[in-house]
Image (cartoon, rainbow, N blue to C red):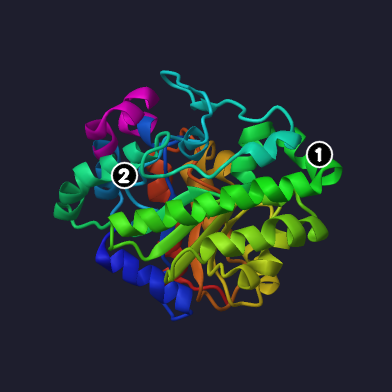
Amino acid sequence: MTQSQWETLVRVVKGEPVEPIPVGFIVDSPWLPAWAGMSMLDYFASEEHWLDAHSKAAETFPDVIFLPGFWSEYGMCTEPSAFGAKCVWYENDFPFAGKVLNDIAEARRITPPDPRTDGLLPFVIARLRHMQQRIRKSGHFIRFAVARGPLNIASFFMGTTEFLTALRTDPDGVHALLKTITTFLEDWLQYQKECFPTIDGILLLDDIVGFCGEDDFREFALPYLKQAFAAFNASIRFFHNDAEGTVTARHCTDIGINLFNFSFQHSIAEMRELTNYQVALLGNIPPRDILALGTPNMVRQAVIDSVRGVSDTRRIILSCGGGMPPDVSSDNIHAFVAGRDALTANPPA
C-alpha cells in the first residue's frame, strides 16, 4: 500500500470527503495466484512468486487499494498451524487445516502458542522481512497486522458445526477456548507491529460471527473481538465478515471497528444506518455472481447501483461484499473502476 493510499484510507475512516470514491479489494490466495499465472502452491512456497503476484496487481490497477497490501499468509492454515494443526497442501486448491480438538471438553488443555517460533507464523514474518526493501522500493509499505478472528480459528480447531453446537452444550468450554485464542491473537498482532513499525492498522477476518444471534454475539464474539482489536493503538481497525452482518454492524463501535467489509446481501444504505453512520464501509457488489461471473457491463452497472439511495458518500470504499473471489478478470476490475468513474461524473442524488 502506498503512502497516498494509506492517507486516503485514514481520511475515509475519519469521515472526511474523498473524491473520487476510493475503490478497494481484499486480495489474497483465492484470487492472486491464478490471476498472476502461477499455481497456488508456488504462490505459497516461493517468496519470489508471492512478491511477483502482489506487485503485478498493484502495477496493473494503480487506482485500486489492495487490502491489506502484500498480505503474507498461508490461507486458513496460518493461525491453526501454530496450535499444531495438520496442514494439507494442493497444487491448485486451498490448503486445509485439520482439527486440533475432538471435543470441546479438550479446550482447557490448549495453551497459547508463541508466534515467534510456532507453526507457519515465523515464515509469515520472514517473508515480509526478506521482501520489505523491494516492497518499499516499489513505493509500498506494510501497514496492517492481520489475523483470522477468534471464532474463525476455533471453528478450524473443531469443525464449524461442532463449534457452534458447543455454544449450547458447553459454553464454559467455548469461553476457555476463545480466551486462549484471543490471548494468542493479542501477542501475534503485537509481534507483527513490533517487527514492522510502519504497521498502523489491524485486519481481523471472522465469518463465524455471522452465524451468531444477538445474545450469542454479545457473549461469545463481542468481548473477544474487542480484546483483539485493542492489541495496540491502530488508526484503522478493519473487520471482514461476509456472512450475515447486521448483528456485527450494530456493535462495530462497541468493538472498536472503524472499517467494515460485509456481505453483499446487505446494502450500503442499510449498513450505514445500522452503524449509525460512524463506521467506514467496504462494499458492496456480489463477489461471485457479478464481479467474477458477470460481464464488464454488469459489473459497471452494479457499482453504480450499489450506492443507490446514498446521498452522502463519505465513509464508503467501493468493493465487493467479501474478499476478491477466484476467477475475477482484469476486464471486470477495470469495469469496476469505470463504474466508480461514472459515479464521479454523475454523483448519486
Tell me: 177 left or right of 35: right
Which residue is disc 1 drawn over? 165
Tell me: 47 left or right of 86: left
Task: Give the quadrant of residue 140.
Answer: bottom left
Estimate the x, y position of residue 284 in percent, counting from the top left. Answer: 57, 56
Whether residue 177 is visible, yes or no, is yes
In terms of sequence position, does the residue under pointer 1 or pointer 2 come before the other? 2
Q: Is residue 45 above or below residue 269?
A: above
Task: Give the quadrant of residue 306.
Answer: bottom right
> Which of these two is toward me, 161 or 315?
161
Q: Which residues are magenta?
A: 34-51
Give me the residue at 27% from left, 29% from top. 46
Q: Amino acid at mark 1?
A: Thr
Estimate the x, y position of residue 222 in percent, counting from the top left. Answer: 68, 62
Task: Give the quadrant of residue 312.
Answer: bottom right
Estimate the x, y position of residue 341 in percent, counting from the top left. Answer: 40, 63
Q: Is residue 122 above or below residue 252?
A: above
Estimate the x, y position of residue 122 in percent, counting from the top left. Answer: 34, 39
Residue 125 badge: 2
Q: Quadrant of the N terminus?
A: bottom left
